[in-house]
Image (cartoon, rainbow, N blue to C red):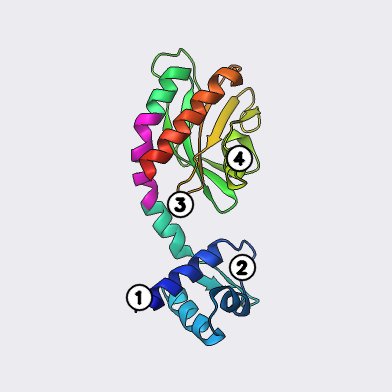
């Protein structure tokens, strides 16, 4: 039973890491098992909604994974919130934790500074393409192994300046920590603070 569970979880990870899906033959080759084993494992995962078969028969992630991810998001947000509060107060800008869901970046925790006259209102649950905005592009940078900060100007909201850094080394979590302000941010000053906050969030989540 332990071997079956291990293989099922490995198959789930393989499917998760294949944006275009996997054929049964490809999955069998990567797992080092026969196609019949993959059919049985996939059948169980499909029954639980973790995997689905598309119109070509390729294995892709199912909606059940999103259900689990949504249950995990409040725990992630709670762990990050004190660190975001400190960052927001230090920088004087709205701080946020953003995670990847497929090709989108989703804000799961947002903390606004208490002492500024004006700041950006950023709603938790807001989503946008990973290709736009500092938060999304920082996640993509983290997936490629880069750990520095990323900046953006007016990509998601006219006049808004953003600085974000990937949350490094947390298995199964592609995320970034960032700040967004209505005025120009000095990246040389803010960037290291954002990177330090992202590293602190990573330690809190491990």
What crowding class fits label 4: few (fewer than 14 Cα within 10 Å), some (14-19), or many (20 or more)?
some
Camera-near label (2 vs 1) is 1
**How far apart, in angstroms, are the residues tagged by discs 2 and 4?**
26 Å
Q: Quick one: label 2 or label 1, which is nearer the N terminus?
A: 1
In depth, the one of 28 and 153 nearer the eye is 28
Q: Secondary structure at mark 4?
A: loop
Q: Nearer the viewer, residue 178 or 26?
A: 26
Residue visible at 54% across and 62% down?
16
Residue 101 coordinates in the image, percent (x, y): 52, 51
**CA distance for labels 1 and 4:** 36 Å
Q: Which mark is residue 21?
A: 2
Q: Tell me where the magenta segment starts and ends, as one range.
A: 72-83
Q: On the rendered structure, is 141 left or right of 43? A: right
> Where is residue 127 drawn, in percent x and y?
54, 43
For label 1, the SS is helix
Q: Bin the neighbour count of mark 2 within 10 Å (Cα to Cα): few under 14, some 14-19, many 20 and up.
A: many
Structural distance between the alpha carbons of marks 3 and 4: 16 Å
Residue 146 in sight in this render: yes
Q: Residue furthest front?
A: 32
Whole-number angstrom distance, CA of label 3 to CA of label 2? 21 Å
Q: Is residue 73 above or below residue 48?
A: above
Q: Are marks 3 and 4 in contact (CB under 8 Å)?
A: no
N-term-proximal mark, 1 vs 4: 1
Membership of 138 in magenta stretch: no
Residue 171, labelled with which disc?
3
Q: Which residue is mark 1?
A: 2
Of circles 2 and 4, which is in front?
A: 4
């Amino acid at each position: 039973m332990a071997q079956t569970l291990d293989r099922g979880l490995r198959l789930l990870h393989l499917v998760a890491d294949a944006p275009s899906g996997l054929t049964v033959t490809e999955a069998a080759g990567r797992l080092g098992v026969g196609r019949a084993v993959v059919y049985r494992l996939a059948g169980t995962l499909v029954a639980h909604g973790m995997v689905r078969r598309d119109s070509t028969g390729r294995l892709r992630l199912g909606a059940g994974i999103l259900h689990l991810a949504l249950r995990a998001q409040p725990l992630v947000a709670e762990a990050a919130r004190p660190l975001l509060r400190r960052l927001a107060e230090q920088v004087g800008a709205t701080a946020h934790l953003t995670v990847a869901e497929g090709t989108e970046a989703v804000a799961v925790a947002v903390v606004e500074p208490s002492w500024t006259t004006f700041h950006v209102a950023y709603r938790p649950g807001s989503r946008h393409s990973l290709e736009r905005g500092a938060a999304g592009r920082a996640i993509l940078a983290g997936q490629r192994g880069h750990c520095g900060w990323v900046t953006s100007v007016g990509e998601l909201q006219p006049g808004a300046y953003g600085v974000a850094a990937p949350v490094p080394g947390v298995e199964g979590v592609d995320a970034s920590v960032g700040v967004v302000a209505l005025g120009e941010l000095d990246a040389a000053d803010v960037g290291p603070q954002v990177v330090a906050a992202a590293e602190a969030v990573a330690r809190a989540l491990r």
